Image: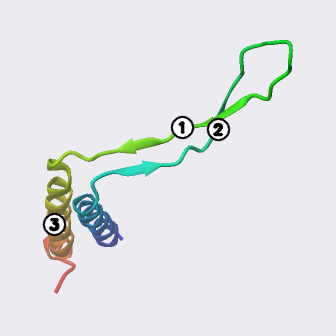
């Protein structure tokens, strides 16, 4: 069970690192829309709906760190059964 867990974590770290290498930025859509009331006047105006978006720009060191740590975890997962005496 531990071997499968560490294989999954290592694989996800490597995939996340490769994704960070391929993109420059990612724009996350807002889960909620913010309603801003319009200035009160004689005429009743509808409130404005403003969408908030978050832009994520990973630093240059991030993809290499994810790939390297994922590779270390994958190597650990492959040697895990042998270290506990349950391997080949």
The answer for how far apart the CA atoms under marks 1 and 3 are is: 36 Å
Q: Position of residue 63 (x, y in %)?
A: 20, 56
Which residue was labeled with disc 3?
A: 71
For mark 3, does the 10 Å Cα neighbourhood hold few (<14), some (14 to 19), or many (20 or more) residues? some
Q: Element under label 1?
A: loop
Q: Quadrant of residue 16?
A: bottom left
Q: Nearer the viewer, mark 2 or mark 3?
A: 2
Q: Is residue 66 above or below residue 28?
A: below
In the current view of this chain or complex, which residue is farthest to the front?
42
Q: Are marks 2 and 1 in contact (CB under 8 Å)?
A: yes
The residue lying at 29 percent from left, 67 percent from top is 15
Q: Position of residue 36 (x, y in %)?
A: 67, 25
Q: Is residue 50 above or below residue 86?
A: above
In the picture, the quarter occupied by the C terminus is bottom left
Q: Position of residue 32 (x, y in %)?
A: 63, 40
The residue lying at 47 percent from left, 48 percent from top is 28
Q: Quadrant of residue 19?
A: bottom left
Which residue was labeled with disc 1?
A: 52
- Please tell me which of labels 2 and 3 falls first in the chain: 2
Q: Are marks 2 and 3 in contact (CB under 8 Å)?
A: no
For mark 2, does the 10 Å Cα neighbourhood hold few (<14), some (14 to 19), or many (20 or more) residues? few
Q: Nearer the viewer, residue 12 or 82?
A: 12
Which residue was labeled with disc 2?
A: 33
The residue lying at 20 percent from left, 50 percent from top is 62
Q: Position of residue 84 (x, y in %)?
A: 18, 70
- Please tell me which of labels 1 and 3 falls first in the chain: 1
Q: Is residue 39 left or right of residue 53?
A: right
Q: Element under label 2?
A: strand
The residue lying at 32 percent from left, 51 percent from top is 25
The answer for how far apart the CA atoms under marks 2 and 3 are is: 40 Å
Q: Quadrant of residue 50?
A: top right
């Amino acid at each position: 069970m531990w071997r499968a867990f560490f294989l999954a974590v290592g694989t996800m770290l490597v995939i996340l690192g490769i994704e960070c290498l391929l993109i420059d930025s990612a724009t996350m859509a807002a889960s909620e829309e913010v309603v801003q009331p319009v200035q009160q006047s004689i005429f009743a105006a509808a409130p404005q709906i403003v969408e908030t978006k978050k832009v994520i720009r990973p630093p240059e060191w991030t993809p290499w760190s994810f790939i390297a740590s994922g590779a270390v975890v994958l190597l650990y997962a492959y040697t895990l059964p042998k270290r506990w005496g349950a391997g080949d």
